[in-house]
Structures are given as C-alpha cells and as structure tokens.
Image (cartoon, rainbow, N blue to C red):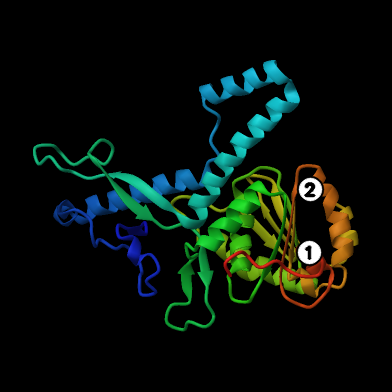
Amino acid sequence: MASVLADPDLRDDPEYEGEVEYGLPRILSQMNEDQKEELYHLVEKKAWIKATQIQEFTDEENAKIAQAERDKGPTFSRKVSDRLYLRYHWDSLRWFLFGGLVDIPIQQDPTRAWDPSDNPFLKVRTRGFVWTQDEHDQAHPYKRLPDKDYLRILAYSWVHEPLLCTPKSRQMMLTWLFSAIAVHDTVFRDARNTAWISKKFDDANATLEKRIKPIVDRIPSRLWKPDIHFKSGILECEKTGSIIRAMGEEAKGLRQYTFSWVFSDEAGFQEQTSEIIEAALPAVKGGGRFTLVSSANGKEAFHGVVSEQGRIAVPAGS
C-alpha cells in the first residue's frame, strides 16, 4: 500500500509504519477494504508517475524554444530548453526522494457510486520511494529518506550545478542521498554512466551492494518491475542502458570511459583527489556532473577546493 500522510507533523514520527488515516475525512471510515486498497494504490501510482517521468515540453514551451532560436540562434535556444529540462528533472527527482501532495478522489455525494477516477479531490501527503537503513536503531532500522531542508537544497543543487563540492560532518545521510540520486539517474534516464569513487574499490563496491541496490530492491514491485543486474563493481539497468561503476581512487580509471556523472565519496581522505579532479573536469565541460563529498581531514586537495584562502567561509549570522 501507499504511505499516506495527511498531517505533515507526522512525517518524521519514528513509530510511523504503513498508512496513517489520521486527519482524513470521515468518508474514509465508510469505505470497505477493497475501496481503501484501490484508493491507496491510486495515491501511490500518481506519486510514482510524478517521481519517474521527466515531462515532455508543452506546446507553449516548444513555441518559446522555437521563438528563441529564431530571435537569437540555436545556442540560445539550447540554453532555454536546458533550463526547462532542469526544471522537470528537479520535479521528478524531488518526488522520488521526498514525495509531495497528491490529489486523490474522495466520495462526498452519497447518491453517487464511489469511483476513484472522477470523485471530488483531497490533498494527501505521500512520502518518497527511498528506503534507508539505520544500523543504530534496532527497533526500526529501515526508514524513509527524511525530508530535511538541507537534503532538498543539496538535491536541487546537484540538478542545477554540474560541479558540486560538499563538506560535511558524519551521520548527515549525504551518502544515502547521493545513492538515491544515483538510483533515479540510472533506472529512469537513458544511457547514463556514473563513476562511484571511494578510496578503495571495495568501499565503492560496498556502497553499490549495501546502499544503492537495496534502494532499488525496495521500490514497490507493483509499480515497477526491476531489470537491474548487479555484479562486482557494476550495477546496470537493462531498460535504460545506464550503469554505475564502482572505482578506487586511481584516476586512470576515469579516462577509460565517458562518464555522465563522477561522484567521489570522502574525497578528503583520498591521496589522488587532485588527479581525480583533473581527470573528471572534462566530463563536466562536456555536459556531465562532478560531485565531491567529504568530512574534514585537514588541508588536503578537497579542502583547497571548498575553501577560500585556506579557510571555509562561515555564513552570515552564524
């Protein structure tokens, strides 16, 4: 069933499991189990469509792109279309990660037969499709990715900024966030080639096996039949032809393939970060992405990238 929340204050309740009917209209209590099942499935299906589809441009948007090309040439037209595409890309990723408000039909007229396709609508909050694992919580180890402001900002920044360097402290769930982004990029977009880099190949491969693959495995099978193939160092989606490759920090591996996205985890602890940056920048210039994430480790190459004159700026008001 769908995970349905009508009350935003319940979103981060660690005791929450399954459906929450609190706050929904009384009519829900008058439905039989089959009607409830149909309703919940409709909510989940609508959320799934929003999470997986990067929409085609509308006729009006296509007209604007064509007008931009007539007025300022194909280069400017490409910038306009890229901007529109990024907007749709963010909308799709946002729904996959964090969910949103779905319009669902609720019967209000007792003279009409209950029909989920055309009855009056109500806004119902749904969660995203990403499950994480908390090794510290014995009672509830499997949880949805939390809808935190800083995670939303980072996900939005990843869509819109091809070069993203993020210093962090531990236990902020950034590896989970970017693992989920990698899943979305791989299973819903065509011909993506992602390099997932850690200090050692075994560490990168462990992320594929213990974080990225479990996110895929927990996508509801009634909404999506997985065609994911995993073997040591490679996770591939047959439908899209997209691949995630686990790699150690040896920069020479980056020159063997053309990558859409290069992700470097704990870059501050890699001895060859400078070489990785040098090898990955051509991918960014060619329209790809390069993301570095790390906790602090002194004045190494990663520190130099994110700092200004050796110091990391503190936001005003801190």
* Residue for point 55% across, 29% down: 57
Residue 3 is labelled as: none
Contact? badges 2 and 1 (CB < 8 Å): no
Which residue occupies the foreground of this view, 174 or 110? 174
* Residue receiving disc 2: 284
* Residue for point 65% across, 53% down: 158
* Residue for point 60% across, 58% down: 154
- Residue type at mark 2 is Val
Please state which of the two labelled residues, at mark 2 or mark 1, is closer to the viewer: 1
Which residue occupies the foreground of this view, 109 or 72? 72
Residue 88 placement (x, y as % from top left): 55, 40
* Residue receiving disc 1: 308
The total of numbered circles placed on residues is: 2
Residue 258 makes an appearance in the image: no
Task: Left or right? Give the position of 222 relative to 243.
Answer: left
- Residue type at mark 1 is Glu
